[in-house]
Amino acid sequence: MNTTFSIEEPIMSETVSAQARPPRPPGATAALVLNDGTVYWGRGVGATGTQVGEVCFNTSITGYQEIMTDPSYAGQIINFTFPHIGNVGANPEDTEAVTAAARGLVIRTDITDPANWRAIEGFDAWLKKYNLIGLAGIDTRALTRRIRDKGPPNGAIIHAPDGNIDIDALLAEAQAWPGLEGMDLALEVSCRQTYEWAQTRWSLGGGYGTLDAQKRHVVAVDYGAKHNILRTLAANGCRVTVVPATATAEEILRHEPDGIFLSNGPGDPAATGEYAVPVLQELLETGKPIFGICLGHQLLSLAIGGTTTKMTNGHRGANHPVKDLETGKVEITSQNHGFRVEPESLPKNAVVTHVSLFDGSNEGFRLTDKPVFSVQHHPEASPGPQDSNYLFERFVRLIDERSAEKGAK
Ligand SMILES: NC(=O)CC[C@H](N)C(=O)O
């Protein structure tokens, strides 16, 4: 690990077009090759090998462990806009899944020795453990501007400590990769078997807790669920049964849930919708409370007849303002999505409840005739602000109201 901390850490090479490929700088052990032939040389960090995926950027300043383990990043290489990634090291608590589904990461400065009381190892060692390939010394600003102006390209990365790097082979890989549109990745990251979840949210001094009073039972459909969603459900008094993405409506209802949760997840919602939508349509018929987040929001929109499209630039960061149209309040949100719901495609019984103040795109809706709502952003944060936590309370209220109604009958 490089132990020198310096913002002046040299960038390996600037953005250069295919016509004028940059010569390999001395010491280069890694490269990123975009499908248009652009080459970025770098210094390898983390695991070795090659990977191919969509290159997107995330603007979060903290939370790199949570971002790298968010299953929604399957099929993606993350370019961090914040220059000092890795400087607080790594700990065993700040993870959102048992394994990492992201394809790799691109960072500006070399990883330094950790400076944080919670760190038990350096970020480089942690990346190796999670089999994540990284490149340091990249002009991440230039790459971000390129993604902002032209949309996220497909690219191939390599970390080869022996310097054995074949740019043409990487270019061919990047060009042959079909891209995220039309790709179902939920099956790759979903759990294989049903399991119970009881861990609650982390607290300073207390770590993660467990829940004693489990008043409500929620079945969470795992399209690639972040653990902090499950933790937040548990912290709100829910016993959570997590079922695979392929669970049928009958399998879900056999657990007799008081409410149903639809998780976040990677890939194109239209592709996942091929098997998820018929199940959701059956679940909607039951009148049970349903809450969806991100991919869950997109799948719910498809189930009621809406459409989703790929965005030119997705939303990935921890400072995105979203307006709750029903209260007029603005919440600062955590985001990670590259597809969006087209609000004009939604049926009359769907009311748009949230909108992005960055680009006006849809961030949420609710149904007027059923206890059903969903949001595009990530109210569980991790990383990010907790302004939107109230949405979990709203879900629990819907569950309690329905239970009270049933009890009164
Ligand atoms: N975080 C998510 O659930 C992402 C949803 C979807 N894969 C998208 O990119 O839009």
Image (cartoon, helix red, strand yellow):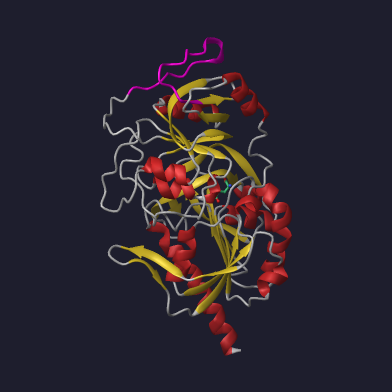
Residue 201 position in % (x across, y down)? 39, 65
Height in image: 48 above or below 224?
above
The reply to whether residue 318 is visible in this rendering is: no
Q: Which residues are magenta?
A: 10-31
Residue name at image x 50 percent, y 55 percent? 97
Answer whether residue 20 is magenta in the image: yes
Height in image: 228 above or below 11?
below
Answer whether residue 372 is magenta in the image: no
Residue 299 position in % (x across, y down)? 64, 55
Q: Quadrant of residue 113?
A: top left
Residue name at image x 45 percent, y 30 percent? 144
Quarter placement of the N terminus: top left
Residue closer to the observer: 124 or 223:
124
Main SS of residues in magenta: loop
Residue name at image x 45 percent, y 75 percent? 237
What is the count of numbered marks?
Answer: 0
Task: Give the residue at the far top of this rendering.
Answer: 20
Quarter placement of the C terminus: bottom right
Residue 106 position in % (x across, y down)? 45, 33
Residue closer to the observer: 369 or 164:
164
